[in-house]
Image (spheres, rainbow, N blue to C red):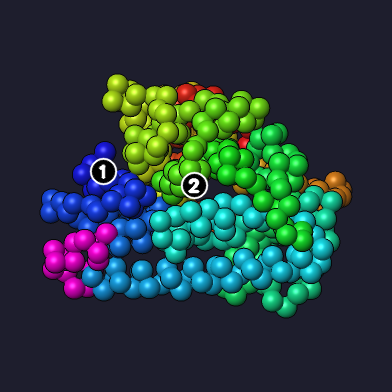
Amino acid sequence: MDKNKQYFIYLVSCFLNNEAPKYDKSVSLGEIYKIASAHGLCEAVCQAALSYFDKDLTDEKMRSVFRQTVGLAVIQSEKAEAATQAVNAFLNDIEEDHIFVKGAVIREYYPVKEFRTSGDIDVIVRKNSFDKICNAVKGNKAFTVKSHKTDVLTAEINSVEVEFHNNADVDCAYFDDAFSLCEKSEEHLYRLDNYNHLLYVICHIAKHLSYCGAGIRMLADIDVLVRAEKNFDLSRLLELADRAGRVRVCEALLSLCAYWFKTPVKSFVDFSKEAELLESFESAFIDGGTFGYEAGAVPLRYINTEKEKQSIFDKVGVILKIAFPSREYLKKCYPYYDRNKLLYPAARINRVADCFKKAGKSKRSVKQVLSQSDSAKIQAKIMKELEIENNQ
């Protein structure tokens, strides 16, 4: 890990621990800002710069960027909070049960809640009510529908993106009936307790590692959820993780948080003696950005990571798999095909058309396939270490 990345981790750790960071003149705050921005954590860096390094900032343009970033974070936070309340009111009005997960809930535990920025609001609804909710969203002028897949509807309200999921979206049977793990909070709003929410975040990271990757903000979410419990009961979390089949993932990620952020939890891995594993984690979590897309845009399931070197035929095969995925994947993407198998040809044409519509993402995926990036192999190695199955 280079100095700028090390210092970025250090600043995030200071933010989570409410500690005053020391200024290191040998690093580039501009470069650290870029890294932090890719992880959705630039506000923490800006706070450190403006609160503790102000006298050392000689670049007025960078100082202005830092101030604007903090100001915009506060504005965006207010919009996100108002959007969450609007979604809650909407679902209560149509009498549909729902659970908010990730940022909409976890932000409350951050040292400065406005600095837990989030690109969207994630809400889980009951599967048997999903179609009704989708129709209600489409009929409500407050929402602008962005996409509608078989298990998720993405809409926008007050310029904030909302994802309505008909499942927990973590590829873990433990959360198949998420509502049974919740307590009723108000009317039709349900809430996961901190231990189940922490396990949810850990399972969510495991899912992202089996797709394109995960980022530092996901680990920061683990940290704040641990700290949210005054007398954190590790045995309780591990018992839940055992039921979910995620003990190894849980132990490793808690250890990584303890190593990087001084998270007050037992460490199961001594990273001072596991240099190779630490290097893999550094590559997977730091280089990939918030969701791993900075390092790789191609889902791991398409790549044969067992081969030392991909032949041109292997690369072409990956590109074809992206353009022509499995029938099950098509069913997830296109609800009409999920409802009617005879519409399979239409779904195939739809997929190819979508590849052209998303030309930028498609070009990036092809570019990654054609290059000899090690990111997929590192990801596969971590998955093997954490006993995560690639069932995407």
Residue shown at 13%/63% (left/top)?
A: 56
Secondary structure predominantly adopted by residues drawn in magenta: helix
Q: Nearer the viewer, residue 237 or 346?
A: 237
**334 lies left or right of 203:** right
Q: Secondary structure at mark 1?
A: helix
Q: Percent from the top left, x then y, of residue 14?
A: 30, 49
Identify which amino acid the numbered label 2 is placed on.
Answer: Ala
Q: Nearer the viewer, mark 2 or mark 1?
A: 2
Asked which secondary structure carries label 2, the reply is helix
**With respect to residue 190, does 174 lie above or below?**
above
- Name above or below for residue 130 compared with residue 298: below
Q: Does residue 337 belong to the magenta stretch? A: no
Neighbour tally class for label 1: few under 14, some 14-19, many 20 plus, Cα within 10 Å:
some
Regarding residue 110, the answer to whether it shows in the image is: yes
Residue at the (68%, 67%) spot, across then down: 87
Q: Which quadrant: the N terminus?
A: top left
Residue 163 on image: x %, y %:
65, 58
Q: Which residue is mark 1?
A: 6
Q: Which residue is mark 2?
A: 228
Residue at the outermost bottom position: 141
Amino acid type at circle 1 is Gln
21 relative to 251 in the view: left or right: left
Residue segment shown in magenta: 48-62
Of 263 and 375, nearer the camera is 263
Front residue of 194 and 313: 194
Q: Quadrant of the C terminus?
A: top right
CA distance for labels 2 and 1? 26 Å
